Image (cartoon, rainbow, N blue to C red):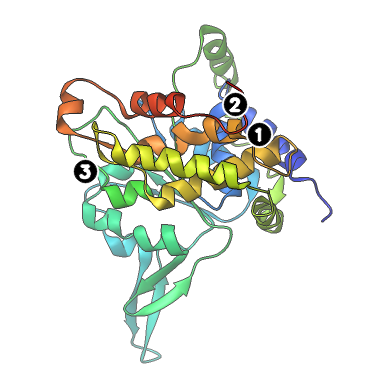
């Protein structure tokens, strides 16, 4: 291999920084998902840079990119494509939907109908799309970057549990500090947006090679047991109606492997698991009605679980 994954990821982070100010954690989490062949749900209030972050990452990669603005009138065929009769050739031809790309921005995903949302289930899990009984593989690498506004409920359709579970992790951006916002105002006050001048720093082949490196990171039996114990504790918690799935536990291990790679290690530490647990698991947890009435959050429950469990290798 003629490249060092850690250096390449930091080059991507620095490139996205030219557009996104002061949100290194959000940028790094998004890249971790990319390394793990995962999809990202960017959830935050309007105007903090959700779409800009997705677009900046897409422009940093020399990959194909499509964007779809989800609205109630978007249909599943807009996403997956459709077949139609060609009168000249006499054949049925496949017309590609927006999903036939490497990086897909699904903007405001909760504004489209559940039927259209479900058109993404197969592509997110299996990297393929089936139209009229014919299955077609998606170009690789493939990643869905979806955005949604958590406080606007008018005209929205909450994502079902099966859809949420297919997002590798959830990213929250948050408001900038005063100094960061001054920097944003300076960058975007000129006639040319910094997003327009952004250039790619790596291509598809390098991304795929980095993704292959993640699976080589050593995961000890103790770490695997730690992850499984966290997942089991969420399923048994009295304030949770639905705990972390096995898919979520696998994602947590993969995310911890990516953390190790970024730190220059070939093995996972428990701290890698602890760092990634909230981003990977919290959006998969469903509160009981009683817990929602009490104002308890999934994040608080997960923090309590992690704090209550012994850390592998830690001395009491």
Give the spatial CA distance, label 1 vs label 3.
33 Å
Q: Are marks 1 and 2 in contact (CB under 8 Å)?
A: yes
Residue 48 vs 61, above or below: the answer is: above
What's the mark number on residue 24? 2
Snapshot quadrant of residue 5: top right
Viewer-nearest residue: 296 or 106: 296
Label located before the other in sequence (1 or 2): 1
Coordinates of residue 274 in the picture (x, y in percent): 53, 31
Residue at 71%, 48% (x, y): give it.
202
Give the spatial CA distance, label 1 vs label 2.
7 Å
Residue at 31%, 42% (x, y): give it.
235
* Quarter of the picture holding the C terminus: top right
How many C-alpha atoms fall within 10 Å of the one at disc 1: few (<14), some, or many (≥20)? many
Snapshot quadrant of residue 153: top left
Residue at 57%, 56% (x, y): give it.
64
Coordinates of residue 156 in the picture (x, y in percent): 21, 39
How many C-alpha atoms fall within 10 Å of the one at disc 3: few (<14), some, or many (≥20)? some
From the image, tell me which residue sits under label 1. Answer: 13
Dot 2 lies on which element? helix
Viewer-nearest residue: 39 or 307: 307
Coordinates of residue 123 in the picture (x, y in percent): 42, 61
Coordinates of residue 74 in the picture (x, y in percent): 27, 54
**Is residue 169 shown to the viewer in this render?**
no
From the image, tell me which residue sits under label 3. Answer: 157
Dot 3 lies on which element? loop
Residue sticking out furthest to the front: 316
**Is residue 116 shown to the viewer in this render?**
yes
């Amino acid at each position: 291999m003629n490249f060092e994954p850690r250096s390449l990821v930091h080059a991507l982070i620095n490139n996205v920084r030219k557009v996104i100010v002061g949100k290194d954690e959000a940028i790094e989490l998004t890249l971790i998902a990319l390394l793990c062949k995962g999809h990202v749900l960017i959830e935050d209030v309007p105007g903090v840079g959700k779409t800009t972050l997705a677009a900046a990452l897409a422009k940093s990669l020399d990959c194909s990119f499509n964007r779809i603005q989800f609205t109630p009138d978007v249909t599943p065929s807009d996403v997956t494509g459709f077949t139609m009769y060609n009168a000249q050739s006499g054949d049925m031809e496949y017309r590609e939907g927006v999903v036939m790309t490497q990086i897909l921005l699904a903007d405001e995903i909760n504004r489209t109908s559940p039927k259209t949302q479900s058109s993404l289930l197969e592509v997110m899990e299996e990297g393929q799309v089936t139209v009229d009984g014919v299955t077609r593989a998606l170009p690789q690498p493939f990643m869905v970057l979806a955005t949604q506004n958590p406080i606007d409920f008018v005209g929205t359709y909450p994502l079902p549990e099966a859809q949420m579970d297919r997002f590798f992790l959830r990213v929250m951006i948050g408001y900038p500090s005063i100094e960061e916002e001054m920097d944003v105002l300076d960058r975007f006050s000129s006639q040319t947006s910094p997003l327009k001048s952004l250039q790619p720093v790596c291509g598809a082949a390098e991304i795929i090679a980095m993704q292959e490196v993640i699976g080589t990171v050593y995961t000890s039996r103790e770490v695997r047991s730690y992850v499984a114990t966290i997942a089991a504790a969420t399923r048994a918690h009295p304030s949770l109606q639905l705990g972390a799935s096995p898919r979520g536990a696998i994602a947590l291990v993969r995310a911890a492997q990516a953390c190790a790679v970024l730190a220059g290690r070939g093995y996972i530490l428990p701290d890698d698991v602890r760092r990634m647990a909230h981003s990977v698991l919290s959006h998969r947890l469903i509160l009981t009605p009683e817990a929602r009435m009490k104002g308890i959050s999934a994040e608080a429950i997960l923090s309590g679980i992690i704090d209550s469990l012994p850390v592998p290798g830690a001395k009491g």
